[in-house]
Amino acid sequence: MATAEFEDIAETFEFLDDWEDRYRHVIDMGKAMAPLEDAFRVPATKVDGCASQVWLQPEISGSGPNAVFSFRGASDAMIVSGLIAILQALYSGLTVAEVLQVDAPGELARLGLNDHLSAQRSNGLRAMVERVRLVAAQAAG
């Protein structure tokens, strides 16, 4: 289960044969994100397990399993900002129940990220996915 926005990213990645082009695209996606205000760059929103500084600010509309999930995020590393943008495309707009059904490793594998990210970046990406799932699970009740 992937959003239309994530499907667009997957199609773009299929078109971009060279990993360097994909890498630049990920960075550009991060640069295009709306900035996260300093007020949200606090310990409560910081994601542990990332080599870079990463903050994810959930935004949940409604309550229970049908609450709509989205989040904003920021990082001090350009590539990680792009990974946040990819996760936004993967999850934003889904209900919290749907978020819990997303096979994030499977969807992200379609982009070939695992083959080209360092071990630290891969661990950080997993930590971000775990944070998203934790927030969704708490919101679902």
Image (cartoon, rainbow, N blue to C red):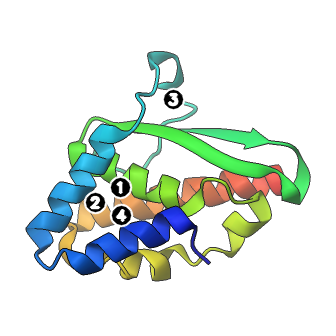
Find the distance from the CA under tag 2 to the CA under tag 1. 9 Å
Residue pictured at 38% horizontal, 82% vertical: 110
Camera-side residue: 123 or 117? 117
Residue pictured at 45% horizontal, 27% vertical: 36
The local secondary structure at tag 2 comes to helix
Q: Are marks 2 and 1 in contact (CB under 8 Å)?
A: yes
Q: Which residue is mark 2?
A: 121
Find the distance from the CA under tag 3 to the CA under tag 2. 20 Å
Which marked residue is nearer to the observer: mark 3 or mark 1? 1
The local secondary structure at tag 4 comes to helix
Find the distance from the CA under tag 3 to the CA under tag 1. 20 Å
Q: Are marks 2 and 4 in contact (CB under 8 Å)?
A: yes
Which badge, 3 or 4, comes first in the chain's sequence?
3
Q: Is the residue marked by circle 4 packed among few (<14), some (14-19), or many (20+) residues within 10 Å?
A: some
Which badge, 3 or 2, comes first in the chain's sequence?
3
Q: Which residue is mark 3?
A: 43
Point out the image quarter for the C terminus.
Answer: bottom right
- Disc sitting over residue 83 in the figure: 1
Asked whether the viewer can see residue 55, the reply is no
Find the distance from the CA under tag 2 to the CA under tag 4. 5 Å
On screen, residue 139 versus residue 13, left or right, reads right
Q: Is the residue marked by circle 3 packed among few (<14), some (14-19), or many (20+) residues within 10 Å?
A: few
Which badge, 2 or 1, comes first in the chain's sequence?
1
Q: Which residue is mark 4?
A: 123
Find the distance from the CA under tag 1 to the CA under tag 4. 12 Å
Residue pictured at 19% horizontal, 66% vertical: 22
Task: Give the vertical position of 17 relative to 74 (above or below).
Answer: below
Amino acid type indicated by mark 2: Arg
Which marked residue is nearer to the observer: mark 3 or mark 2? 2
